[in-house]
Amino acid sequence: MANHPDKPSGFSVWGKLLRARLYAVQTLPTIHVYHCDAVVHGGLVIATPHGFTNIIADGTVPDGDAGLLGAVIAVMDHDMNPVSHILKLTVGEGGVAGYIMVADHPDQEFIAQEDCVTAPIALAEGGMNADLIAATICLGDSTTGLSTQEIESDSAATTSTLSLKLHYPHPEDTIPGTLNTNHPRWIVTMNAHYYGDTMAGIA
């Protein structure tokens, strides 16, 4: 095992990709959208040149929100050309700033690093829930196109409404973490998932 450097990169698919579907980002979003961002269902279907498409919520950072869909695995502009990210306030065309593919199966596993702020996640906390944490307006790395979202370490608890389910740490990482020098990665699923059996509909 070894220390994992502090390199937040959002939520990447772990293991087999179970499903991916297309979602629209409406024109003039107030958050950025990057690869590996966790995103929330926007509670609306719109007509687009590519058919009827669900939208994502684009007005708030998705930490602490119910209705998580999963994480972004591809980003396109309004013409479906691949791009590194969609900037806030992008106009696009026809009411659409761009499109994203989201790994949105409720059983999909992801890997993400913890932020190690205040209280790193202990091995005994595997099986608990935790929140994710995102930079203001979901600002990511514009060079790599990757998210900077992380697991909020000190939120780990048994609370049923927290966003993520902690499964186990990456087998090569050292537990517990240490701020600035060791940020372990955890395998998680989206606990407050939009397509989960007990989630209310969003309107």
Image (cartoon, rainbow, N blue to C red):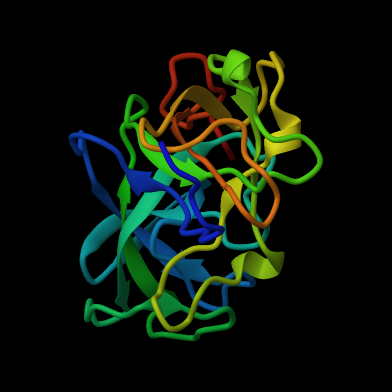
Q: How many marks?
A: 0
The image quarter in which residue 60 lies: bottom right
Give me the residue at 44% from left, 38% from top.
173
Q: Is residue 177 left or right of residue 95?
A: right
The image quarter in which residue 155 lies: top right
Q: Is residue 201 left or right of residue 11?
A: right
The image quarter in which residue 20 lies: top left
Vertical placement of 69 versus 159: above or below? below
| Residue 174 place in picture, x, y as percent | 50, 35
Give me the residue at 65% from left, 48% from top.
115
- The front one of 25 and 189 is 189
- The front one of 102 and 201 is 102
Give me the residue at 40% from left, 41% from top.
111
- The front one of 174 and 113 is 174
| Residue 47 place in picture, x, y as percent | 33, 62
| Quarter occupied by the N terminus | top left
Query: In the displayed image of the protein, which residue is found farthest to the right?
Result: 118
- The front one of 122 and 24 is 122
Vertical placement of 139 versus 150: above or below? below
Vertical placement of 170 versus 72: above or below? above
Q: Is residue 71 left or right of residue 120?
A: left
Query: In the displayed image of the protein, which residue is found farthest to the front?
Result: 1
